[in-house]
Image (spheres, rainbow, N blue to C red):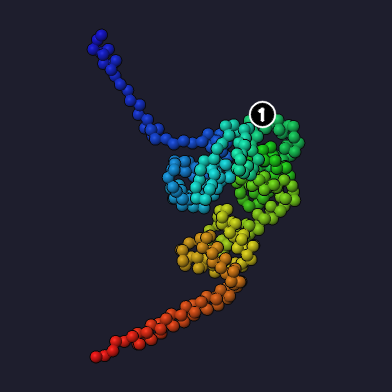
């Protein structure tokens, strides 16, 4: 054996993985079912979350790391909970089990609640042959897609799939879907991710008739108007509210009946003490005013003045008691 052959025999190689040396797992369902439909921020947040592993984080931390508003980070996390990829329990997010194929169902175990939305019966992204067959065999589907194009403009393949899923997977009648699409256009939210999230919500809420759809649209309109009152009173920039903010605004304005002036007064106290818009702080303020039956700014001013005077008098009494105590406790002169 020659010297060169000996060198070749003992030659060792090392594979430099570079950036591939550190990886993290991504669920197949994320790519197979959501990659085409999810928005940019939603994909950013879920990938950042998976990269964090078991390390704790907050929506604020995600927003800072990704350079997006905190409200968008919260909405993105809520989106993945709604899609069934994450399960929320108090302050913990955990991966939710996914079926191996789109047609399989995960039967609930004893004591476990079934999923709110009906399970998917086929792939999220049907091929062109499936779409052509559905259009050919169903005049209702054909009419729905034509009306949807008049409402939203030229439909992308992703939007076509979402609309088709609304009928075939979630069971919404075409006429109900059209009402949903008109609403999305009117509020300026025509992205596939938003429309699919509304479809899921309507399906899980049992909105399967025109009457139920009208009631749902009335509720959504009232929530939108309530948020407009709160955003105006607090001087917030124009943006979509998070689910928590929307529900809080509806509670303050519609259920508790507070005026814009009262909401503005609550925000002033919130900003003075926290330096920002805080749903939790404002809710405590408005809840206290509701319990004390304070309905106008004048009522609040009068109540706060009474409390301030009571505190001042109490301090005066305490000071007088201390002075009297000091007088009687003076040491006797020798």
Is residue 217 shown above or below 305?
above
Residue at screen point 69% across, 52% down? 216
Given residues 120 and 210, the one toward you in this image is 120
Q: Splitting the image into 4 quarters, where does residue 135 fall?
A: top right
Please rate how many residues cluster around mark 1, counting C-alpha atoms within 10 Å: few if below 14, some from 14 to 19, many from 20.
few
User: Which quadrant, please, contains the C terminus?
Assistant: bottom left
- Can you give x and y, in whole percent of width and height, for residue 28 in the image? 53, 34
Residue at screen point 57% across, 65% down? 287
Q: Splitting the image into 4 quarters, where does residue 196 fall?
A: top right
Is residue 264 shown above or below 54?
below
Given residues 322 and 164, the one toward you in this image is 322
Give the farthest residue toward the top. Answer: 1
200 sits left or right of 39 in the view:
right
Q: Secondary structure at mark 1?
A: helix
* Residue 192 seen from this side: no
For label 1, the residue is 129
Is residue 30 shown above or below 328?
above
179 sits left or right of 280 in the view:
right
Residue at screen point 41% across, 83% down? 321
- Can you give x and y, in whole percent of width and height, for residue 173 in the image? 72, 42
* Residue 84 seen from this side: yes
- Can you give x and y, in whole percent of width and height, for residue 78 in the image? 55, 48
Given residues 16 and 288, the one toward you in this image is 288
- Can you give x and y, in whole percent of width and height, for residue 91 in the image? 50, 50
């Amino acid at each position: 054996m020659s010297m060169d052959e000996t060198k070749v025999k003992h030659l060792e190689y090392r594979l430099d993985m570079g950036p591939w040396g550190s990886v993290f797992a991504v669920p197949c369902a994320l790519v197979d079912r959501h990659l085409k439909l999810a928005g940019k921020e939603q994909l950013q947040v879920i990938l950042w979350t998976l990269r964090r592993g078991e390390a704790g984080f907050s929506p604020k931390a995600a927003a800072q790391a990704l350079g997006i508003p905190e409200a968008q980070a919260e909405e993105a996390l809520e989106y993945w909970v709604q899609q069934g990829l994450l399960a929320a329990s108090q302050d913990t997010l955990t991966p939710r089990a996914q079926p191996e194929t789109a047609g399989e169902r995960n039967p609930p175990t004893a004591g476990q609640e079934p999923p709110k939305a009906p399970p998917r019966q086929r792939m999220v992204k049907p091929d062109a042959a499936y779409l052509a067959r559905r259009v050919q065999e169903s005049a209702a589907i054909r009419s729905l897609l034509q009306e949807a194009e008049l409402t939203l403009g030229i439909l992308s393949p992703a939007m076509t799939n979402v609309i088709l899923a609304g009928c075939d997977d979630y069971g919404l009648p075409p006429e109900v879907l059209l009402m949903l699409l008109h609403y999305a256009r009117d509020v300026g939210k025509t992205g596939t991710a938003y429309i699919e999230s509304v479809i899921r919500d309507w399906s899980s809420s049992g909105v399967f008739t025109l009457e139920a759809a009208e009631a749902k649209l009335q509720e959504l309109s009232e929530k939108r108007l309530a948020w407009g009152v709160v955003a105006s009173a607090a001087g917030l920039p124009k943006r979509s509210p998070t689910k928590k903010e929307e529900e809080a605004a509806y509670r303050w304005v519609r259920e508790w009946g507070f005026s814009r002036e009262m909401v503005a007064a609550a925000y002033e106290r919130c900003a003075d003490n926290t330096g920002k818009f805080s749903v939790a702080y404002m809710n405590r303020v408005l809840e206290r005013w509701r319990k004390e039956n304070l309905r106008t700014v004048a009522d609040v001013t009068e109540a706060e003045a009474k409390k301030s005077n009571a505190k001042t008098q109490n301090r005066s009494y305490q000071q007088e008691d201390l002075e009297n105590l000091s007088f009687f406790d003076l040491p006797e002169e020798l």
